[in-house]
Amino acid sequence: MSRSQTSIKAMLATAVITTACAIAGPGSMSIASAKTASSKKPSIKQIEQNAEVVGYKSMAEIAKILKGASMSDVLKSKDLRAKFGSQLIPILGSVVKTFDTSVAEQPSLIPFFTGARNHYLAIMAVLGDQAALTRLGELAKSSNAFQNLLGRMYMQEFLWLTHQNDAAVQQKVITELQAIARKHPMNEDICQLLMTIRHIGPANHQLAHQVRVIILKDLHSPFAQQYQQQVAMQTAQSSHLNHHVVFKGTLLNNGKPFSSTSLKGRVVLVDTWATWCPPCRASMPHVEKLYSQLHKKGLDVIGVSLDQSPKALKKFLADHKKMVWPQMYDVNKPGNMATARAYGIAAIPTQFILDRNGVLRYVVVGYNPTQITADIKKLLAEQ
C-alpha cells in the first residue's frame, strides 16, 4: 500500500476509529506510478505529508470537541449531530480544501484523494452542510466517468446515514453499491465505503450482513482481500474459544522453550503485540498496572511479540522495565507468524485470556482496557 493510501485510510478514522494495527507491519512506499513533480510544484511527498498532518490535526480537534464520543457516535445520533454539527463542519471542510489543493497541484494524486474527499463531503452533508450535499450531487452527475462513479458512491453513503431507521431506503443503497462492486471489483473506495456503512447505522442486522457478504464475495481489491483474510482468521480464532489451548515458543531473554502449561492454576493474559503498533504501546501501561495489582491474586502475563526486528524489541523492553513477564520471541524466526496463523491474529493488540485450567475464555482485539480488566477479574473470581 502506498504512503498516500495509508494516509487516507488513517484519515478516514474520523468516521471509524481504529484501535488495532493490521499485522502487515509498519512502513510504506511513495506512489511509484506518480509523475515526478516539476520544480514549480510541491513534490508528491510534500503533498502527502501535508495531507497527513492536516488529517491527524483534524482528528485531534474533533476529539477535543466530542470529549469522549466518537464520530461514529455522532453519525448514529440526530441529537449529537445537532449538538456538534456546526463545530465539526468547518474542521472537515478544511480537510476537503486540503484534498482539493493537493489534486490541483498534483493531478496524479486524484485516484488516491478523491474517494476520501467525497467521504468527508458526505459526512459534512449528514451534519447539515447543504453546500457539501450540493457538490456531492453535482459530482454524481459529472460527465467524467471517474468523478461520476465516486460521486454516486458517496451519495449512497449520505442516503444510508440519513436513513438509519428506514430499511427500505438502505436496501436500495445496498442494491446500488452491490452493482458498483460487481462492475468495479478492484476499486478500493467501494470496499472502504461498504466497511463504513456496515458498522454505522444499519437499520437491522440483516442489512449489515448483506453488506458484509458483498465485501467477501464481490470484491477483489487488496484492501478487500485483507479483510477477507481477517474474517478467515477470526473464524479460526473462534474455533479455539472455550477449548484448552497451549501457547508455546522460545523465550527472548534466554532462548529456552516456554509453554503456557507451566502456568496452570493461574489466569493468563497472552498479549500479542509489536513495538511499531501505536495501540499496542498505548495498552502497555494498563497491562503493567493489571500485572502489578493482580499478579499476587493469580494473574500472569505472557508477551508474544510480532516484531520483525529483535533489536527494536530488546530496546523497547529495556526502556520499559515494568514489563517483567515472559516474552516469547525466537530471534531466528522473527514475527511469530506461526502463532499468528494458528490463533487467527489479523490485528494487534489481540489479547487471549485463559482461565485457571488453560481454557481460552475471552479474546479481545484492539486496545480495550475496560473489557480486559472485567474479563480477567471474572476469571480470578472463579474457583
Image (cartoon, rainbow, N blue to C red):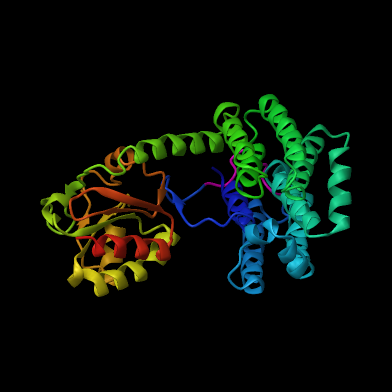
| Residue 86: in magenta span | no
Judge left or right: residue 380 versus residue 92: left
Give the residue at the far top of this rendering: 183
Judge left or right: residue 323 versus residue 42: left
> In the image, residue 356 lies at what x, y percent?
19, 56
Judge left or right: residue 247 versus residue 164: left
Q: Is residue 283 above or below residue 2?
A: below
Residue at x 56% of width, y 45% of height: 2
Query: Quadrant location of residue 185?
Result: top right
> In the image, residue 100 lies at what x, y percent?
78, 53
Q: Is residue 316 above or below residue 357?
A: below
Judge left or right: residue 367 versus residue 99: left
Magenta region? 29-37
Quarter that holds the C terminus: bottom left
Query: Quadrant location of residue 376?
Result: bottom left
Name the dominant secondary structure of the magenta segment: loop
> In the image, residue 110 lies at what x, y percent?
73, 44
Q: Nearer the viewer, residue 41 or 377?
A: 377
Query: Quadrant location of residue 238?
Result: top left
Q: Nearer the viewer, residue 347 or 58?
A: 347
Q: Is residue 322 visible?
A: no
> In the image, residue 349 lies at what x, y percent?
39, 55
Residue at x 42% of width, y 57% of height: 277
Give the residue at the far front of this rendering: 383
Residue at x 78% of width, y 55% of height: 126
Q: Is residue 55 visible?
A: yes
Q: Nearer the viewer, residue 218 or 145?
A: 218
**Tally of numbered tags:** 0
Quarter that holds the N terminus: top right
